[in-house]
Image (cartoon, rainbow, N blue to C red):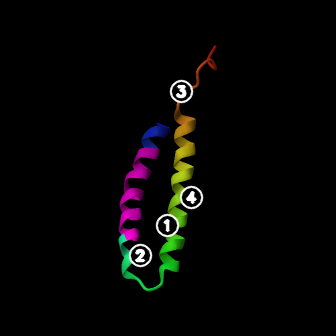
């Protein structure tokens, strides 16, 4: 279930990140897009940690 949730978060996040990067090239104030991209990277990190938790653990079941 965790992997499914992470996947559903990651897909739209990738689109948002791409459009913000395009927008960054058009704006004369990249600070705002830098902040947005920084927060996206943070979300990606959290999703990555979530996926790590979703992986089956070897030797933990009895």
Per the image, the residue denoted by label 2 is 24
**Hey, which quadrant is residue 19 in on the image?**
bottom left
- The earlier-in-sequence mark between 4 and 3 is 4
- The Cα–Cα distance between marks 4 and 2, rounded to whole angstroms, is 18 Å
Reply above or below: 33 against 13: below
- The earlier-in-sequence mark between 3 and 1 is 1
Is residue 16 magenta-colored?
yes
7 with respect to 39 (left or right):
left
- The Cα–Cα distance between marks 1 and 2, rounded to whole angstroms, is 10 Å
Q: Are marks 1 and 2 in contact (CB under 8 Å)?
A: yes
Per the image, the residue denoted by label 4 is 42
Which residue lies at the image location 47% right of the left edge and 84% below the top edge? Answer: 29
- The Cα–Cα distance between marks 4 and 3, rounded to whole angstroms, is 24 Å
Q: Secondary structure at mark 3?
A: loop
The rendered magenta stretch, by its main secondary structure, is classed as: helix
Is residue 49 magenta-colored?
no
Extent of the magenta region: 6-21
Q: Secondary structure at mark 2?
A: helix
Quadrant placement of the C terminus: top right
């Amino acid at each position: 279930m965790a992997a499914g949730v992470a996947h559903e978060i990651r897909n739209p996040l990738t689109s948002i990140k791409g459009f913000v990067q395009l927008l960054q090239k058009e704006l004369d104030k990249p600070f705002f897009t830098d902040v947005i991209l920084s927060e996206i990277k943070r979300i990606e990190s959290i999703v990555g940690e979530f996926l790590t938790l979703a992986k089956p653990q070897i030797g933990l079941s009895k």
